[in-house]
Image: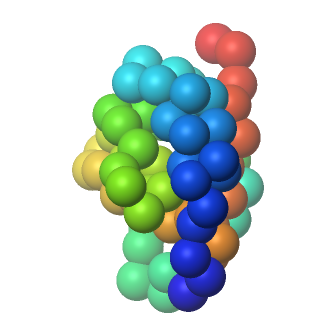
Amino acid sequence: MRGISADTLKRLKDSYIPGTRVVLIEMNDPYTKLMTGDKGTVTGVDDIGTIHVKWDRGGSLGVVFGEDSCRKIDD
């Protein structure tokens, strides 16, 4: 996994504040039941850039910076 710059981390924390709605684009985890298009609500961003999400279909799993991807949506 790549490191994250301070500027990128700040941008993520400013963009993905708790309560932000997101849609999953890709999750590089062979064991997850999440699928592209699943939606959820951000609970926070940690200091390594993982966007923590409470998913609508149940559970919470982070979107790992540099491995997975999601985007903000308007509900």
Which quadrant is the N terminus positioned in?
bottom right
Residue 64 coordinates in the image, percent (x, y)? 51, 66
Find the residue positioned furthest to the top. 75
Query: With 53 as the anchor, is 25 left or right in this view?
Result: right
Residue 35 visible here: no
Query: With 33 as the anchor, is 2 left or right in this view?
Result: right
Residue 32 coordinates in the image, percent (x, y)? 42, 73
User: Does 62 sit above or below residue 52?
Assistant: below
User: Does 34 sit above or below residue 40?
Assistant: below
Residue, x 56% and y 53% (percent of image)?
6
Residue, x 27% and y 50% (percent of image)?
59
Taking depth in this image into account, of 54 and 10 the one nearest to the observer is 10
Residue, x 40% and y 83% (percent of image)?
31
User: Does 47 sit above or below residue 10?
Assistant: below
Residue, x 50% and y 81% (percent of image)?
29
Residue 44 coordinates in the image, percent (x, y)? 36, 37
Taking depth in this image into account, of 69 and 8 the one nearest to the observer is 8
